[in-house]
Image (cartoon, grey):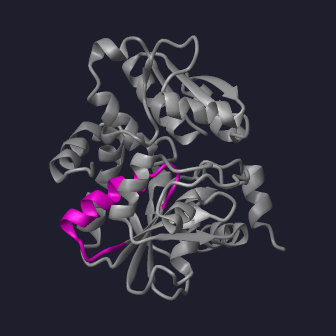
Amino acid sequence: MPVTISQAEQARRNIASAAFRTPLVPLNADAPASLYLKLENLQPIGSFKIRGAANVMALTPSQQLDRGVLTASAGNMAQGVAFCARRLGIKATIVAPETAPAAKIHAVERLGGQVIKVPFAEWWQTFETRTYPGVDATFIHAFDDPHVMAGNSTIALELLEDLPDLDAVVIPWGGGGLACGIASVLRALAPQVRIYAAEIETAAPLAASLAAGEPRVIDYKPSFVDGIGGKTVFPSMFELGRKLLDGSVVVSLNEAAQAMKLVAERNRVIVEGAAACAVAAARSGRAGSGKIVAIVSGGNIDLSKFAELVAPG
């Protein structure tokens, strides 16, 4: 079910002590539209994921949290869960794919999270079963959870307060929890706003599923865009996305890398691959004209990889 306005407002109160209200700034570059950046990369963990993690843990009974928490994540939700768990004094266990970037894994470990690295298929299975052998803890889903989506939806409340006449929003699509959370509130309060998912060409299951009219499995290829993309779309998230979104804009790896470089040069901001997809999609013209916001979902990328991607030539 979509997030309600009352759930979004409650979530804003729940996360106030953990998550920041992030700035909305113009992109200092020529583009087919007036582009703005919602800088979620400035959150304490460098990602929007702190919003959903903080909200779901605020709403989970203490006797469940005392068992510790478990999540499956390539890095950003892992950091959100580990950050909130440390504040509560409980154990956090993270199941991560072997392809997860070292910067994100090290960040989780600095926050006190225990990381279990597994093959991609085993990692994805953890999403589906919401368990991991030998770990007795409360599972926190990275996206397919109404409380997580409600935490994410607080971004929409801030957008409408800071830019009430916005025309479109472009949101990275990983599992769909960010896009569907934001879209739920926008559809209720500003139904005229166009809402697009952003995906990368090497892993765009939503675009394939929307074209087919049902969830489809794609040929997933790992890349520097590690914060979004999977082999398929959960049926529940597909149904929400199909109802709430105006479509998916798929960008190339080169477009994403160029967006990373542009934001660094013009705004002096480091964005990770997933966030760069939203910027690239917004700049492409495929999200239309007017005032367009790209959700800069995170900035957690290995600096050596970032330097390689934005280097001249």
Quick check: 226 above or below 145? below
Identified at 57% across, 63% down, the residue is 208
Q: Which residues are magenta?
A: 172-194
Residue 133: quarter of image: top right
Identified at 42% across, 87% down, the residue is 289
State the quadrant of the C terminus: bottom right
Residue 312: quarter of image: bottom right
Residue 284, how many percent across, how many down?
57, 81
Q: Residue furthest right?
A: 313
Residue 126, how many percent across, how many down?
56, 29
Identified at 53% across, 13% down, the residue is 135
Quick check: 28 above or below 289? above
Residue 38: quarter of image: bottom left
Residue 28 showing in the rendered view: no
Quick check: 114 above or below 150? above
Quick check: 134 above or below 57? above
Identified at 20% across, 51% down, the residue is 4
Residue 37, how many percent across, how many down?
46, 68
